[in-house]
Image (spheres, rainbow, N blue to C red):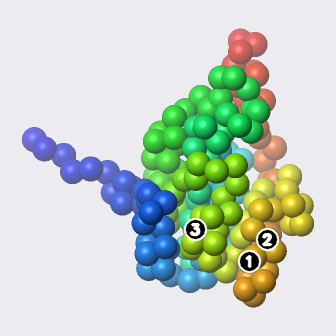
């Protein structure tokens, strides 16, 4: 028997396709980004809250090289980009998932022009990359407080101790 590819794979979007694919999504469009190395409850709660702010959610993921440049540790990311993208795409709250090689997602933000830009509560609005641009075209920027204090770095530290 031949099995079809999982439906979530349709949510994977190469950066070169982002402009057209984002334009086809229902608005208002919400945008967020991150490493999402080991997906945990904090991530999925945050992503569901972000999606609730609009009709569609685009998630841009740091490439493996971009994660390494963030200085999270020599063994990061634990999961390769293609795996992180697939896990995020499988979430109901996520409409489209793409990636970026740069240190920040600014190019992806400018390409899809979201009405709403979101980051987690550890990011003050004035420090969120793309905030000035989104506000400049009449959009909103939100820093969503954490409901569940979770951290991939803390989780990895716990695993190493075991």
Q: Position of residue 80 (x, y in %)?
A: 51, 34
Find disc 1 in the rendering and name its residue. Answer: 134
Foreground of the two, 57 or 61? 61
Find disc 2 in the rendering and name its residue. Answer: 131
**Res. 61 in view:** no
Find disc 3 in the rendering and name its residue. Answer: 57
Residue at point 47%, 54% (across, down)? 89
Judge left or right: residue 10 versus residue 158: left
Foreground of the two, 121 or 146? 121
Residue 103, placed above or below residue 133: above
Residue at point 78%, 56% (across, down)? 120
The mark lying in front, picked from 1 and 3, is 1
Q: Position of residue 102 (x, y in %)?
A: 64, 50
Residue at point 70%, 54% (across, down)? 104
Residue 10, placed above or below residue 5: below
Identify the image quadrant of the C terminus.
top right
Q: Position of residue 70 (x, y in %)?
A: 74, 39
State how far apart marks 2 and 3 are (Cα): 17 Å
């Amino acid at each position: 028997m031949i099995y079809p590819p999982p439906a979530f794979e349709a949510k994977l979007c190469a950066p070169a396709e982002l402009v057209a694919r984002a334009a086809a999504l229902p608005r208002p469009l919400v945008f967020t980004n991150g490493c999402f190395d080991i997906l945990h409850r904090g991530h999925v709660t945050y992503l569901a809250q972000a999606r609730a702010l609009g009709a569609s959610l685009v998630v841009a993921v740091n490439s493996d090289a971009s994660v390494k440049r963030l200085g999270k540790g020599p063994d990061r990311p634990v999961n390769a980009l293609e795996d992180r993208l697939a896990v995020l795409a499988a979430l109901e709250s996520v409409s489209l998932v793409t990636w970026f090689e740069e240190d920040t997602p600014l190019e992806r933000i400018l390409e899809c022009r979201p009405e709403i830009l979101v980051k987690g509560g550890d990011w003050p609005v004035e420090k969120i990359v793309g905030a000035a641009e989104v506000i400049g075209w009449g959009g909103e920027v939100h820093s969503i407080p954490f409901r569940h204090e979770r951290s991939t770095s803390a989780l990895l530290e716990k695993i190493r101790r075991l």
